Amino acid sequence: MSIDKLDLVFPFVVFAYGVVMTVVLHAPIFAVLAEQRLSPQMREQLEKHRGFSVISLILGGFWTLQNLWFP
């Protein structure tokens, strides 16, 4: 994979991570599942990613739009 291709694809990866993690961390159904199935340490570690997921969602979204508008 060339650097140009990676530069085109990477913003979509960041945006996709932000979308998936934001949905998982903010949906009540997933909170209930995490409470039932994950250890307290794992839940705490997952909750620490909440801020990073929102930042990835916002920055990845703008970065993706920039790549779509200004190729």
Image (spheres, rainbow, N blue to C red):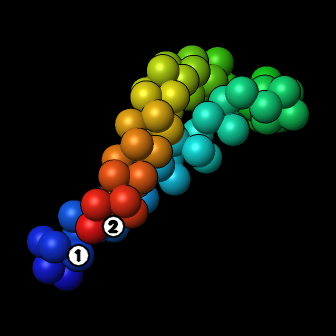
Q: Are marks 2 and 1 in contact (CB under 8 Å)?
A: yes
Residue 50 lies, with reference to residue 37, above or below; the image says: above
Residue receiving disc 2 = 9
Q: Label 1 sits on what residue type?
A: Lys
- SS for dot 1: helix
Residue that extends furthest to the bottom in the rendered view of this protein: 1
Residue receiving disc 1 = 5
The picture quadrant where one finds residue 35 is top right
What is the x, y in percent for residue 60?
41, 44
Rendered residue at 51%/53% (across/down): 16
The foreground one among 55 and 30 is: 55
The foreground one among 68 and 30 is: 68
Picture quarter with the N terminus: bottom left
Residue 60's mark? Answer: none
Picture quarter with the C terminus: bottom left
The foreground one among 59 and 14 is: 59
Indicate left or right for 5 with 33 as reference. Answer: left
Cα separation between marks 2 and 1:
6 Å
What is the x, y in percent for residue 30?
79, 35
The picture quadrant where one finds residue 32 is top right
